[in-house]
Amino acid sequence: MADTSNQAWLARSQAAVWHPCTQMQHHAQTGSPTHLPLVPIARGQGAWLYDFDGRRYLDGISSWWTNLFGHANPRINAALKAQLETLEHVMLAGFTHQPVVELSERLSALTGGALGHAFYASDGASATEIALKMSFHYWRNVGRPEKAEFLCLAGSYHGETVGALAVTDVALFKDAYAPLVRAATVVPSPDFRLAEAGESPADVARRAAAALAEHLEKHGANIAALIVEPLVQGAAGMAMYDPEYLRLARELCDRHEVHLICDEIAVGCGRTGSFFAHEQAEIRPDLMCLSKGISGGYLPLSIVLCSDTIYAAFLDDSVSRAFLHSHSYTGNPLACRAALATLDIFAADDVIAGNRRKAEQIAAALAPLAGHPQVEHLRQRGMISAFDVTTDDPYFSRKFYRAALDNEALIRPIGNTVYLMPPYIVSDAEIAHLGQAIGAALNTALHHG
Ligand SMILES: *Cc1c(COP(=O)(O)O)cnc(C)c1O
């Protein structure tokens, strides 16, 4: 009989699967400080993942920020089974289908009709590329081809394909490919950890907006769009900022005729306390990217929503003025059905209100860390909580990660930033479990790792 233990699966995976965001050699270095465990998962249920040896892990980061309502969610499963029996896929050029129409209508309604046109792809980086191309092509179509540059924030992350790397300011992901990338201009981040003595988060936001204003005064005529992660810059290490920045950025973009692209791939779908993060600034972007949580963490799906003005600039007899971008699985019915089932749960369960209570419980579970001598910037925005650990240990993040797994929790720090982004179905007991796992992992990583 075939060996179905963890050990067998991880050996086969190490041999045949090239894992993402990983130095593969680190998987093999058992016992070394660089060792990164590889965990074979047999099944998932609710907030929990189970391996082949009967161990379990509470998914404290929603499997890379995708899973909103738990693994093997009965409602999403049922919707997908029904869709599977009806239509698994059809090309979206020249054809359409019920899930893609309904999803587009519902997303438009969620933006109050401001972003009424939905374009589909399969992953977040593609959504970024689509938004950049749409903005660039819009300016060309309206006779302003000189507006061809992009702005992004320091520490920004918008994906890792060659086009998306142009607006991603994370050296680790970008430097090796710099010669391939037509880099955007980086403007200061409103990250409130950058506050100088006496400055409030809103002051930091105003200071960053002043730098944006100065750049736009000089170069606005050549700029197509500013792309931002509203309220929380995820891959930068959960850098959080005041909504004031988005209000000011919206005004500045209007004044200088620059598109505002909100990348809500990580922060959308209720993660920050409102359905879209940008709502907290009472603004609307010209273009919005969605992915990750929109399909409930089930299937690869991304969407770019745009305004009537942008859409209208592509309507013409000429094919070359059209947006000719496409992917084979554009608008896949199963992925759209998973997204509709996800939106149904939001509506039926009043998830946004429920998350407010959960966010308070998470805050309470992490509150004792505020007194820890090596913890700083304990912070939270809705269902994202984070803190930074002051340590010179270059192996802190993987020591913490390993120790968290030993404490039945999947918590994968970004550098020295530990964060929680649990599924919204996380229970009180599970929140307590995450709090205890963090305390124990911190102790092990700092003192015994
Ligand atoms: C994850 C992420 C992306 C990229 O999405 P992929 O599906 O990984 O390509 C883009 N922007 C933000 C803000 C993200 O968090």
Image (cartoon, rainbow, N blue to C red):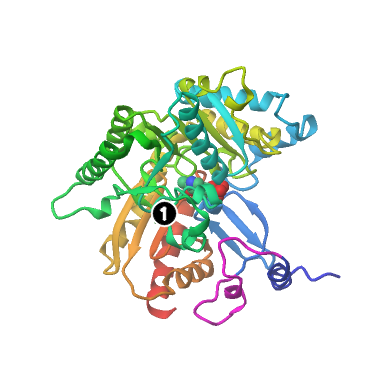
For the stretch drawn in magenta, the main secondary structure is: loop
Q: Does the magenta stretch include residue 18?
A: yes
For image coordinates 50% across by 67% down, the residue present is 407
User: How far across and how far down the image is residue 157, in percent?
Assistant: 45, 50
Q: Is residue 427 visible?
A: no
Which of the image's four quarters has the C terminus?
A: bottom left
Q: Pick the residue in front: 335 or 144.
A: 144
Left or right of 376? Residue 93 is right
User: How far across and how far down the image is residue 181, in percent?
Assistant: 50, 53
For image coordinates 56% across by 19% down, the residue present is 315
User: How far across and how far down the image is residue 56, in percent?
Assistant: 60, 62
Left or right of 390? Residue 431 is right
Left or right of 31? Residue 207 is left
Q: Pick the residue in front: 270 or 153.
A: 153
Furthest-right residue in this view: 1
Category of crowding for the residue at label 1, using alpha-carbon neighbours closer than 10 angstroms: few (below 14), some (14–19), many (at least 20): many
User: How far across and how far down the image is residue 172, in percent?
Assistant: 46, 63
Q: For numbered disc 1, what is the local secondary structure?
A: loop
Q: Pick the residue in front: 357 or 265.
A: 265
Q: Is residue 211 visible?
A: yes
Q: Does the magenta stretch include residue 313?
A: no
The image shows residue 50, relative to residue 144, as above or below, that is below
Q: Pick the residue in front: 426 or 226.
A: 226
Left or right of 187? Residue 110 is right
State the extent of the magenta-drawn residues as a range: 17-37
Which of the image's four quarters has the N terminus?
A: bottom right
The quadrant in which residue 224 appears is top left
For image coordinates 52% across by 28% down, the residue present is 347
> Residue type at mark 1?
Asp
The image shows residue 312, relative to residue 345, as above or below, that is above
Where does label 1 land, which residue? 169
Furthest-bottom residue in this view: 31
